[in-house]
Image: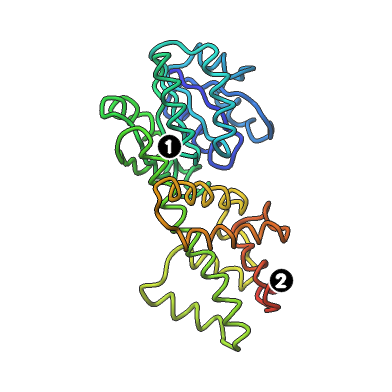
Amino acid sequence: MNLGFIGASGLMGHGMAKNLLAHGHRLALTVHRNRDRLADLFAAGAEEVGAPAVLAAQSDIVFLCVSGSPQVEQAMDGLLEAATAGLVVVDCSTSDPESSARLFERCAARGVVFVDAPLARSPVEAEAGRLNVMVGAEPAVFARIEPVLRGFAENVFHVGGPGSGHKIKLLNNFIAQAICTATAEAFAVGARAGVDLQQLVALVGAGPVNSGLFQAMAKTLHGDMDGLRFELDLARKDVRYYTHLAESLAVPSFVGEAVHQSLALASALGHGAKNVPALVEAQEQISGARLVPR
């Protein structure tokens, strides 16, 4: 197929684009930043175009993998300048469901199909073509795009109609960040209480509380802050979208608000541009505990 991609210089987008090329698709890219990260894609045959409108005019499917809804909306403004009926736009970002619903209606009025297909797993799996994708789309649309998605995904979940993908992704990320924030807090309390944190890690690792996220946070106790390569400010944004979703449904979200505020505090303390494990550093500042060896 003729594919377009916005966001290929990102940690997830690069691997996705690389694997789409490897599966024989023709791929055109817009360049926003980090041109150096795109050199291998251009060497593999990707085409550079100057604007989203050009992608819309020449593509069967355009993928978006950007930071959040403001960036998705900006990209869609450009795509819809030249989009014609039949174009499929697949938003792989973690986006606000309310924004996605508005974009779905705007696209439908032009005969364009807007699909929400956010991602799970990490940049490592993106490069390996082993992401998880959760797709919100009508069955016929899903059947059309699933073979393309499998170019960069190991598991493709059709989770419901339009909008379902972004909603279930916010639930997934809320649970993930609740684990990370709880782990960082437990480390601080344990350290102040005189607990051997390595024994805590051993205990959790042998029982049902264990998870990959817990182990990624535990690496901070050895000075490894890159066990989870996900920017803290992006996690904060995702949980904010989750609390807005809960509020729109009149569902109390006490834990969600606590997780969001923990991330907001860590960002205010200067850790927003770091990876999520920097929550442990924020807990050091709050509690006075010494957790990360330096």
Q: Quadrant of residue 184?
A: bottom right
Instruction: Give the residue type at disc 1.
Output: Phe
231 above or below 98? below
| Badge 2: residue crowd in 10 Å (few <14, some 14–19, many ≥20) | some
Q: Residue furthest front?
A: 250
* Front in this rendered view, residue 202 or 160: 160
Residue 196 in the image: x percent, y percent? 57, 86
Residue at point 55% right, 26% down? 44
Residue 51 in the image: x percent, y percent? 62, 18
Q: Which residue is mark 2?
A: 285
Q: Secondary structure at mark 1?
A: loop
Residue 28 in the image: x percent, y percent? 54, 20
Quadrant in the picture for the N terminus: top left
Quadrant in the picture for the C terminus: bottom right
Pick whichever of labels 2 and 1 is earlier in the sequence.
Answer: 1
Q: Say how the picture is coloured.
A: rainbow
Q: Could you give the CA–CA distance between mark 2 and mark 1, rounded to whole angstroms? A: 40 Å
Q: Which residue is mark 1?
A: 152
Residue at point 32% right, 41% down? 157
| Badge 1: residue crowd in 10 Å (few <14, some 14–19, many ≥20) | many
Q: Secondary structure at mark 2?
A: helix
Q: Quadrant of residue 266?
A: bottom right
Residue at point 48% right, 58% down? 256
Residue 33 in the image: x percent, y percent? 68, 32
Instruction: Give the residue type at disc 2.
Output: Gln
Q: Quadrant of residue 87?
A: top left
* Front in this rendered view, residue 132 or 177: 177
